[in-house]
Image (cartoon, rainbow, N blue to C red):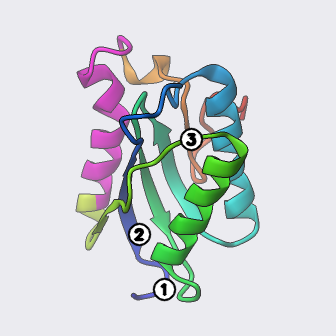
């Protein structure tokens, strides 16, 4: 994997997961853990958005330990600390152009609106961006 490549990541909760990822306390903890990973240089977050049963992220990873190991570690931490039950694996798609990156950003931000969870993008608080001053359950 090329250093600096941005990937669209989607991680789903397991069917046995009772608490929604958008439960305020859980969402706050998850978004804080995302910020900690960013600050530690484990990934660089462009966008991270929680939905009730899955999450979307636009992330770049250092070459070592790489995407799979980093996501596996983050999921293990959330499973242990926040009791989140995740499905195995995750979806990833490398964004190969700025145009695709912009389209994916808008797709992710519109996801809660399309799913009729909120009236507009600005009403959804369960997201955070490393490149924009964003709202979010973490109060950033």
The C terminus sits in image quarter: top right
Q: Secondary structure at mark 1?
A: loop
- Outermost residue to the front: 16
In the image: residue 43, left or right of residue 18:
right
> Which badge, 2 or 3, is on the more N-terminal residue?
2
Q: Which quadrant of the rendered structure holds the N terminus?
A: bottom left
Q: How many marks?
A: 3
At 36% from the left edge and 35% from the top edge, which residue is drawn?
A: 15
User: Which sits in the foreground, 15 or 117?
Assistant: 15
Residue to which mark 3 is pinned: 84
Mark 2 lies on residue = 6
- Which residue is found at the position 70% from the left and 38% from the top? 29
Q: Which dot marks residue 3?
A: 1
Instruction: Judge whether 37 appears above or below 112 on screen.
Output: below
User: Which numbered disc covers residue 36?
Assistant: none
Q: Nearer the viewer, residue 38 or 54?
A: 54
Q: Name the secondary structure under disc 3.
A: loop
Q: Which is in the foreground here, disc 3 or disc 1? A: 3
| Neighbourhood count class around disc 1 (C-alpha, 10 Å): few under 14, some 14–19, many 20 upward | few
**Could you tell me how far apart the alpha carbons at marks 2 and 1 are, in whole angstroms?**
9 Å
The span shown in magenta is 101-119
Q: Main secondary structure of the magenta part?
A: helix
Find residue 112 and report its horizontal and vertical position in percent. 35, 25
Give coordinates of residue 92: x percent, y percent.
32, 64
* Residue at screen point 67% across, 62% down: 38
What's the residue at 56%, 71% (across, down)? 70
Q: Secondary structure at mark 2?
A: strand
Q: Is residue 52 visible?
A: yes
> In the image, is residue 117 above or below residue 139?
above
> Which image quarter: residue 113?
top left
């Amino acid at each position: 994997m090329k250093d600096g490549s941005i990937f669209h990541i989607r991680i789903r909760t397991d069917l046995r997961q009772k608490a929604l990822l958008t439960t305020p306390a859980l969402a706050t903890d998850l978004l804080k853990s995302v910020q900690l990973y960013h600050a530690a240089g484990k990934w660089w977050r462009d966008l991270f958005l929680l939905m009730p049963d899955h999450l979307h992220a636009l992330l770049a990873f250092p070459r070592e330990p790489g995407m799979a190991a980093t996501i596996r570690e983050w999921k293990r931490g959330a499973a242990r600390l926040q009791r989140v039950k995740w499905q195995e694996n995750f979806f990833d798609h490398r964004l190969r152009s700025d145009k695709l990156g912009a389209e994916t950003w808008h797709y992710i931000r519109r996801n809660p609106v399309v799913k009729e969870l909120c009236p507009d993008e600005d009403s959804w608080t369960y997201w955070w961006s490393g490149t924009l001053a964003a709202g979010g359950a973490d109060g950033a």
